[in-house]
Image (tube, grey):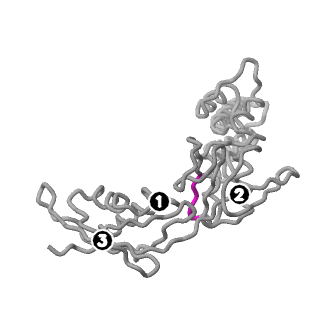
Amino acid sequence: MSYGVVSTGFERKPLAVILAEIEAANIAQFGPDVIQTAQSPLGQMNGLAANLIAQLWETAEDIYQSYDIEQSEGTRLDIGARLRLLTRAEGESDLAFRSAITNQGRARIDLADLVRAIAAIPGVTYARAFVNDSGIVTADNPVPAGTICVAVLGGSDAAIANAMSQHIVPGIATYGNAHVDAVLDGYCRSFFVLRPALVPVKITVNVKLNPDIDGCPAPSLVAVRDTFYTELTETRPISNGDDLTAFRIRSPIEGPFPNVEVVSFFIEHNNVIGAVDEPLVIPFGSIAFFTREDLTVVEAIP
């Protein structure tokens, strides 16, 4: 059997096993006739050593568990609470304080927690949350004041609704174009979620390649295209309602590559190629969609 940190947690070595290992080591060292009964001098030393080693195993287990809020106690629980910017109230028990740290039985309304929970749902490829702090409803932000909008691509409605029920307190309205339900503790809660419509686009960018200040050549067009795609999908990903403006297209290229200059660009949408440097307006309920192959970077003709 394995002891210490294992896949299921921490497995402490029992006192009986420790003693048996010591006795086996003595037999290997002194032979099978060595006397180590409990009443013998060697047996007494075995018991003392086994007890000390068992205490070390208990200390190791306590240290391991102290890093888990669900198992930590006392001072270690106070230290873990600092990650949540929480302090223990006077006379508050470990049980009550632990529940406050882990939000047991409470909905968390932090948008980062909400997005993280939804993004972890199998099949979800895009997750964002929006609020309207100004209270002014516009085409760019149609979310009413005091309302949360969760935009999601992929994932099941049931899983999304369950995540929303865990992170949005009752009484907070939601905004979207799809209705989802969750049943929690015997109560049904209904939410709206925004399922953005995909807007397929193709982008062609004409660039000028310049040597850098040290005289080294500019990166290849393929490298520029790949970085352009990564910037738009991972580093600073396109969100629903993000217009494809000149800045949105130039910065993912000229930022990483100061010696690459965007001369012009064209956006193709619905098989129609727009004018030179003409931006494409994307409604809040939609999101631009493209693959790596839909992005083309070519060297501008002098």
> Tag 3, which secondary structure?
loop
Q: Which mark is residue 276?
A: 3
**Mark 1 highlights which residue?**
242
Q: Main secondary structure of the magenta part?
A: strand
Q: Which mark is residue 90?
A: none
Give the mark nearest the N terminus, 2 or 1: 2
Q: Between marks 3 and 1, how big is the CA–CA gap?
A: 19 Å
Residue ID at (56%, 41%): 134
Residue kind at label 1, given as amino acid type: Asp
User: Quarter of the image containing the C terminus?
Assistant: bottom left
Q: Between marks 3 and 2, how big is the CA–CA gap?
A: 39 Å
Q: Between marks 2 and 1, how big is the CA–CA gap?
A: 21 Å
Depth check: give the residue in front, 246 or 190.
Answer: 246
Quarter where residue 225 is shown: bottom left
Depth check: give the residue in front, 128 or 196.
Answer: 196
Q: Which mark is residue 192?
A: 2
* Residue 251 placement, left or right of 101: left
Residue 235 place in picture, x, y as percent: 42, 57
Residue 210 place in picture, x, y as percent: 16, 63
Give the mark nearest the N terminus, 3 or 1: 1
Disc 1 residue crowd, few under 14, some 14–19, many 20+, Cα 10 Å: some
Residue 57 place in picture, x, y as percent: 66, 37
Q: Which residues are magenta?
A: 125-129
Is residue 126 shown in magenta? yes
Q: Mark 3 or mark 2: which is in front?
A: 3
Give the mark nearest the N terminus, 3 or 2: 2
